[in-house]
Image: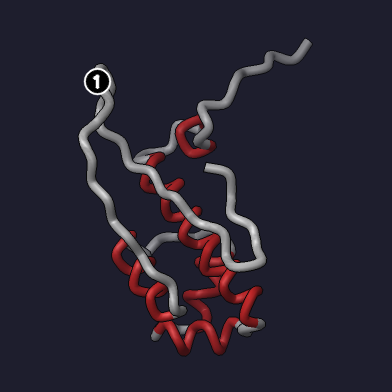
Amino acid sequence: MAKVTMSSGNVFADLGLPHPEEALAKADLTGRIQDVMDAEGLTQEQAAARMGIPRPALTRLLGGDTRGFSLDRLFRCLKALGQDVEIRVRPKAPGESGRLSTVVEALPGGWAPAA
């Protein structure tokens, strides 16, 4: 019989990858880039031009390859696509270590991934 293991809520942590919180944040931000492209009917060429990046780099990013994309670079890409990016720092919960998380709000008439 197969062994079932409960997810932590972060697939990157479940897979034992390094820096799982950053990897999840990058995935969430990349998802928002795709959502904006879909909502505005942008081609990869048009979106890449607006973001000031080569189209092949955008293709790799949308395919899940975030190498070469820091969180800061993804923030700048989202700003170029007309998105507001807010960074908030708050005290950690008692008894917990600090953490990195993202909150992606729904696009008008759209959806947002579960937090």
Name the residue at the front extreme. 108
For residue 104, above or below residue 79: above
For residue 51, above or below residue 34: below
Q: How is the image coloured?
A: secondary structure
Place of residue 57 in the rendered image (x, y in percent of width and height, measured from the top left): 47, 75
Kind of residue sitting beneath label 1: Pro
Q: Can you say which quadrant of the picture contains the N terminus?
A: top right
Q: How many discs appear? A: 1
The quarter of the picture where residue 95 lies is: top left
Place of residue 98 in the rendered image (x, y in percent of width and height, measured from the top left): 25, 32
Q: Which residue is located at x 44 percent, y 60 percent?
A: 66
Q: Which residue is located at x 57 percent, y 26 percent?
A: 7
For mark 1, what is the residue? Answer: 94
Place of residue 52 in the rendered image (x, y in percent of width and height, measured from the top left): 39, 85
Q: Is residue 111 left or right of residue 25?
A: right
For residue 104, above or below residue 89: below
Q: Between residue 64 and residue 89, name the one nearer to us.
A: 89
Name the residue at the top extreme. 1
Q: Is residue 111 left or right of residue 78?
A: right
Q: Which residue is located at x 52 percent, y 83 percent?
A: 47
Which secondary structure, mark 1? loop
For residue 112, above or below residue 76: above
The quarter of the picture where residue 39 lies is: bottom right
